[in-house]
Amino acid sequence: MHAVKARKLPSYAVVLVENGQGFIETDAGGRQSVKGPALFWLFPNRQHSYGPDAEGWNERWALFEGSFVRDFIRLRLISEQNPLTVLRNNDGLQRLFGNIHADLIEDTNLSRASAASALHQIVILVARQASQATSSLQEGSDTGEIIEALRKRALQSLDIAAFAAEHGMSPATLRRKITAEVGLPPKAFQLRVRMDHAKELLTTTDDKIEIIASRVGFDDPFYFSRLFHERENCTPREFRMRYRRR
């Protein structure tokens, strides 16, 4: 709800604005309006201000440093002059920020390496969306509309060929476009939507695990629990205990 004003950080930062709107202001990039979903980069020892309007916004952030950042800058994947990227969607980014959060809670050498890998993927995914926005490449239906259609039909069986034909493209083009946008192929994206809905139900309702499994499209609650554990590294019950919203 509150703005950061005239601050300097000792390290780099990445801020994902999931929804809401406001502003960012840096010496190199000037003042820019921000409307979620959007992402911006902050550079060390550079004064910056940013924050939401009166309605507030939802954000995720991470601090980072290291020699690999020089490659990001050299390849112009992140830029001090153009710190802001307007996103067509933030599904893959939300997943990656969630992975970083979980890895840093674990706090082992392996989990820290995994967090660094997720940050690399964030850089690539954002740069790819920025590149696609610049080139304005359109093949058939708008990708954002396709992603929304996939989300709405997440509980349905997906015939890739038929769905691609609905949007005037081949299955290979569909897979390429969806993977480029969200970091996952279509069916894996739909599964992620189902799992995200399950996590929301686990933390906001008292429904039994088998009821939640059914609500997100799994007839077998044991299969649901096994798949959930493979993806979240904890059981649905453990997830509920850890993240329950009271």
Image (cartoon, rainbow, N blue to C red):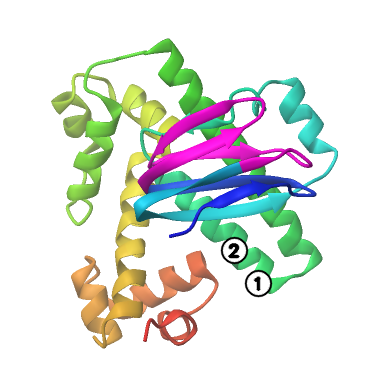
Q: Is residue 86 visible?
A: no
Q: Residue at x 77, y 41 (%)?
A: 44
Q: At x 46% / y 27%, what residue is drawn?
A: 129
- Check disc 2 and report the residue beneath it: 101
* Segment colored magenta: 20-48
Q: Nearer the viewer, residue 8 or 203?
A: 8
Q: Quadrant of residue 120?
A: top right
Which residue is labeled 1 in the image? 105
Q: Residue at x 59, y 24 (%)?
A: 82
The reply to whether the C-beta atoms of the residues labelled 1 and 2 are less than 8 Å apart is: yes
Amino acid bearing label 2: His
Magenta highlight on residue 47: yes
Quick check: 56 left or right of 162? right
Q: Position of residue 229 (x, y in %)?
A: 48, 73
Within 10 Å of disc 2 (Cα), the crowding (few <14, some 14-19, many 20+) is: some
Instruction: Look at the magenta stretch and give its main secondary structure.
Output: strand
Image spot of residue 24 (x, y percent):
52, 38
Relative placement, left or right, of 125 versus 189 is: right
Q: Would residue 119 be visible to someone looking at this image?
A: yes
Label 1, label 2: how far apart the Cα atoms are: 6 Å
